[in-house]
Amino acid sequence: MSGEFYDGLETRSMDERESALMTALSKQVAHARAKSSYYRTLLADTDPGAVTSRKALAALPVTRKGDLLELQKKTPPLGGLNAVAPNALGRLYMSPGPIYDAEGLEADPWRFARTLFAAGFRKGDIVHNCFSYHLTPAGMMVDSAARAIGCAVFPGGVGNTEMQVQAAADLKPSGYAGTPSFLKIILEKARETGADISSLKKGLVGGEALPPSLRKELSELGCDVLQCYGTADLGLVAYESPALEGMILDEGVIVEIVRPGTGDPVPEGEVGEIVVTTLNPNYPLIRFGTGDMSAVLAGASPCGRTNQRIKGWMGRADQTTKVKGMFVHPGQVAEVVKRHPEIAKARLVVTGRTSEDVMTLHCESAQHDDSLAKAVAATLQAVTKLRGAVELVAEGSLANDGKVIEDARSYD
């Protein structure tokens, strides 16, 4: 752990990394099937020894975050996804829902040391940690990572702005961890009161969007920040480096970008849902649909880290919409496309005013004739139980924003 990189994993060749990940994937599938009651059933017909490629991985079912609530109610407390008994874990957390999350006994169980290191934190630093320590794992994600690097931690948590400013002035922390909006509040309060918190030169932020304007404001207030992307289920998924060109994938996960409502990977550059397979032995999530959207960036980061990059958080994938009193799901749009191989891509647009809903399925296709449009319209009605128009458009003409269903109704 020296120089510019946290460890040698970050600078492996793409082939070396892929070979190691696919070997680990096969072992993880075998482990999950043997130790987790949920995966024992879900993957009953899967040969772990054959899951050694991304193509084989893509054939496995997706378990989405939205499924956890019911799974955990059915098999408390962790839905049977855990591979060790709850009392053998290090900590258990409760996220809104409630959804329960598992932490192992490792020194850096959420793998956040990598992103802290990329943000400039080193042994001997003091980290002012303002992620929440209450119920959810965010605070301990950073706390355990900082300790693994060799940093001291001030567990500030959320709120108590004046006390946080006083602590920063007294303890002289090297940097901040928490949401960007709370960092702005702290920095502005210090400026207002005249407190000297100039030691806060760097920060790792997450948990909410970081628009360029806010990043600029924080920098002008004296603190340069990098952001990370992770979840309470998976830990770290991706992180920024000083190059500020996309977010680099963590070395402990396998990430796919799939078309919303399906498990089908999209071409590089196309926006879709982030699906993650973690190599965590305690809570071995396999093809876990986060519900967040992003897209793969071509090439490697100029910082020298060689892992794949994504654009960062680009919205939510759950675009379920109620039309004429009935829910229409992205998976239903995917089913229509599946039944018509002439369609490359589709987007359902709902227009009209309240109670006057109009559905139009825009389909990218090289074939533009009435017979195809009529056939697709019949399938749309059969799948959704609702009538809708079909418009055939040129291939490549639909927006690359990950939207499968667009609610364009007027609610005036």
Image: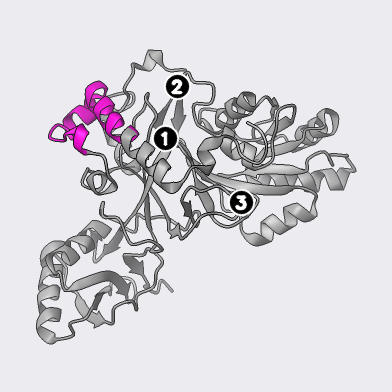
Q: Residues within 10 Å of mark 3 (few under 14, many from 20)?
A: some
- Mark seen at residue 192: none
Residue 344 within the segment the image draws in magenta: no
Q: Secondary structure at mark 2?
A: loop
> Is 165 in front, or is 307?
307
Amino acid type for the residue under numbered disc 1 = Asp
Mark 1 vs 2, N-terminal side = 2
Amino acid type for the residue under numbered disc 2 = Gly
In which quarter of the view is residue 155 placed?
Answer: top right
Residue at x 63%, y 54% (from the top left corner): 243
- In the drawing, does residue 8 fall left or right of residue 123? left
Query: Which one is in front in this view, the residue at disc 1 or the one at disc 3?
Result: 3
Q: Provide residue 35's location: percent of width, then percent of height.
A: 26, 21
Amino acid type for the residue under numbered disc 3 = Cys
> From this viewpoint, is residue 38 visible?
no
Query: Which one is in front in this view, the residue at disc 3 or the one at disc 2?
Result: 3
Q: Are marks 1 and 3 in contact (CB under 8 Å)?
A: no
* Quarter of the image that includes the N terminus: top right
Q: Secondary structure at mark 3?
A: loop
Q: Provide residue 68's location: percent of width, then percent of height.
A: 32, 36
**Extreme-top residue of the structure:** 87
Q: CA distance from mark 3 to mark 2?
A: 31 Å
> From this viewpoint, is residue 17 visible?
yes
> Is 222 in front, or is 270?
270
Q: Provide residue 242's location: percent of width, then percent of height.
A: 65, 50
Q: Which residue is mark 3?
A: 303
Q: Which residue is mark 2?
A: 104
Q: Secondary structure at mark 1?
A: loop
**Residue numbers of the magenta segment:** 24-50
Q: Which residue is mark 1?
A: 233
Q: CA distance from mark 1 to mark 3?
A: 28 Å
- In the drawing, does residue 330 fall left or right of residue 121? left
